[in-house]
């Protein structure tokens, strides 16, 4: 069983920063792919960033240069550092884990609102 719990969302001004954190519980969490998705109203859920157990990362073009993903395999945590936030970054952000059986697990989501 895998459980994911996000934290760190909130209201921030354009140009500001937030750091999201996700705690992953369950066996062998450190070997799985971890990532962040987001979903804005009226839009599909999109992949923002992901990171393998070995540290290989993917960053979506829309946030490249502004967002950074990292993980701690000892604490079973994944983080998303968000800098230079824009209004279009407003969305619910979801933590994701993909296990070796290609099954996806999701956190409950955390709201990020960028507004002046």
Image: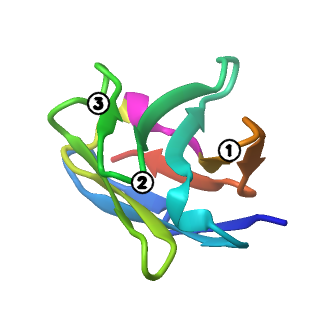
Q: Residues within 10 Å of mark 2 (few under 14, many from 20)?
A: some
- Which residue does the numbered mark 2 point to in the structure image? 53
- Which residue does the numbered mark 3 point to in the structure image? 63
**Label 1 element class:** loop
The stretch of residues the image draws in magenta is 88-93
x and y, in percent, of residue 107 in the image: 71, 57
On residue 100, the disc is 1
x and y, in percent, of residue 23 in the image: 58, 73
Which residue is outermost to the left?
65
Task: Assess whether mark 2 and mark 3 are in contact (beta carbons under 8 angstroms).
Answer: no
Q: Marks 3 and 1, how far apart in space? A: 27 Å
Q: How did the renderer colour the structure?
A: rainbow
x and y, in percent, of residue 84 in the image: 19, 44
**Label 2 element class:** loop
Residue 54 shown left or right of residue 9 in the figure: left
- Could you say which is closer to the camera, residue 20 or residue 22? 22
């Amino acid at each position: 069983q895998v459980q994911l719990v996000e934290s760190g969302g909130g209201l921030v001004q354009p140009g500001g920063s937030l750091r999201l954190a996700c705690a992953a519980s369950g066996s062998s969490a450190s070997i799985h792919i971890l990532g962040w998705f987001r979903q804005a109203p009226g839009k599909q859920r999109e992949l923002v960033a992901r990171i393998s157990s070995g540290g290989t990362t993917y960053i979506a073009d829309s946030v490249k240069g502004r967002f950074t993903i990292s993980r701690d395999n000892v604490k079973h945590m994944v983080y998303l550092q968000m800098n230079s936030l824009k209004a279009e970054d407003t969305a619910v952000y979801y933590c994701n884990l993909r296990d070796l059986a290609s099954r996806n697990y999701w956190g409950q989501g955390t709201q990020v609102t960028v507004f002046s």
